[in-house]
Image (tube, coloured by chain):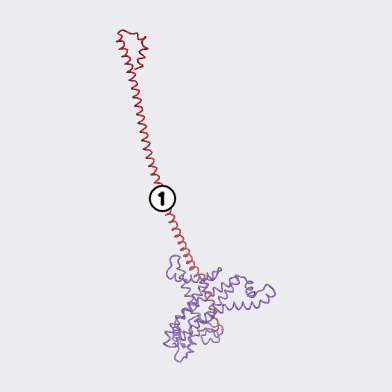
Amino acid sequence: MAAGEELTLSSHIQHHLTNAKMCTVDGSVAFNKACSEAGFWTWHIDTLAWSIGLGLIFLWIFRSAANKATVGVPGKFQCFIEMIVELVASNVKDTYHGKSKLIAPLALTIFVWVFLMNLMDLIPVDFLPAFAGFVGEQAFGMDSHDVYMKIVPTTDVNLTAALAIGVFILMIGYSIRIKGVLGFIKELTLHPFSSKNVPLQILLIPANLILETIALVAKPFSLALRLFGNLYAGEMIFILIGAIGLMQLPLHFVWAVFHILVIVLQAFVFMMLTIVYLSMASSDNH
Amino acid sequence: MNLNATLLGELIAFAVFVLFCMKFVWPPLNNAIEARQKKIADGLAASDRAEKDLALAQDKAKDQLKEAKAQAAEIIEQAKKREAKMIDEAVHKANAERENILAQAKAELEAERNRLREELRKQVAALAVAGAEKILQRSIDEAAHSDILEKLVQEL
């Protein structure tokens, strides 16, 4: 444990669950605790660095496979990459019936990127934060308690919310592109309660609007919070297990094995729901 | 866990990753997979077709062989028939020839015999006349007795 003996368990956990922050205070760059008053314009630099780094790794791996892709007999690396592409492509083909050049690459990006970010959860919880603390102490003369490092980007609600908002924007965009603005408004106002009687239908519009809007907005919320909640809880349990001494080894093993399932499943679920939501957004029959 | 500017940064990163993936990653990989699938499908179809063609060709070859055998048998049959016919004809012809030759020989023989007989008759007649002349000692009027002599010759 990087934290000293004097640290209590709760402050240890708190330390693990805090992001490294960056902001500007009075025109100069400030970090961590100095940013407590910065409000919205605070950047979680660990989340940003790890997520963008992992995203670049994803793109680099797949791009190098794409560069070497051959129609003839594929190598083992290409086979592996094609397996993932095939998985995503078949799911998209089964679920999304329209024609779109965006859906499949979007699904692939979400699946692999989220998977890689979730995968960071399997690195023992103290390794990288302790290393960061050591570097901070040696290189910058900081107190190692003041160096924060949260290495699983999907345990930061900012990241999951950003993904969900991105999908939400696409949902609205697809709805409007396929059905037109009027069609989109109709969908929000004329269902699920509808009547052939025009005055009655007008009366029903507010109820429809409330229901449909809630249903629409619930989708990005469920996307963001499902991923965040699963990974945050998993991370929390890793931290708790890590705090109980030598007995952690078998427990950690069991939880890590179970967590492999969670990691893949959550990435897959996020991808599948994205495809389903976008296919709902672009289908006309309500 | 309050939301902050990180969200905007991640949103931009997300958009950039998706766009990069859409432009440079997905199309080449997917195209390679689809092209290979098509190639394999074509190959399988071609092998199916080749198999069918082979079976067809084998059937055809068998038919042709059978036909050729039948033809050969027919030709042999015909040749045999013709041989028999030729032999028959030759025998026939030879027989006819023989008959002919025999008939000719017979006719010649007959003619010769007739001629000889005629000659003999004439000689006999002459002899008879000479004999009669001798018997009668004296010359007989040949003209007066020629009808008797003629009768005598006829009777021989």
Residue extending farthest to the bottom is: A6
Tell me if B149 is positioned left or right of B35 in this view. Answer: left
Task: Return the residue nearer the eye: A207 or A227.
Answer: A207
Per the image, label 1 sits on a secondary structure element best described as helix
Q: Amino acid at mark 1?
A: Lys
Q: How many marks?
A: 1
Colour used to depict chain A in the structure image: purple
- Residue B11 sits in which quadrant? bottom right
Task: Return the residue nearer the eye: B83 or A9.
Answer: B83
> Looking at the rendering, in which quadrant would you find the N terminus of chain B?
bottom right
- B139 versus A170 height, above or below: above
- B118 versus A212 height, above or below: above
Residue at left offset 41%, top offset 50%: B66
Q: Position of residue A135 (x, y in %)?
A: 44, 84
Which residue has dot 1 on it?
Answer: B66
- Residue B53 sits in which quadrant? bottom left
Task: Return the residue nearer the eye: A105 or A19.
Answer: A105
Q: Chain of mark 1?
A: B
- B139 versus A122 height, above or below: above
Circle 1 crowding by C-alpha within 10 Å: few under 14, some 14–19, many from 20 = few
> Looking at the rendering, in which quadrant would you find the C terminus of chain B?
top left
Residue at left offset 48%, top offset 87%: A13
Q: Position of residue B127 (x, y in %)?
A: 31, 14
Task: Return the residue nearer the eye: A250 or A123.
Answer: A250
Tell me if A253 is positioned left or right of A26 in this view. Answer: left
Q: Position of residue A111 (x, y in %)?
A: 50, 75
Q: Position of residue A100 (x, y in %)?
A: 55, 69
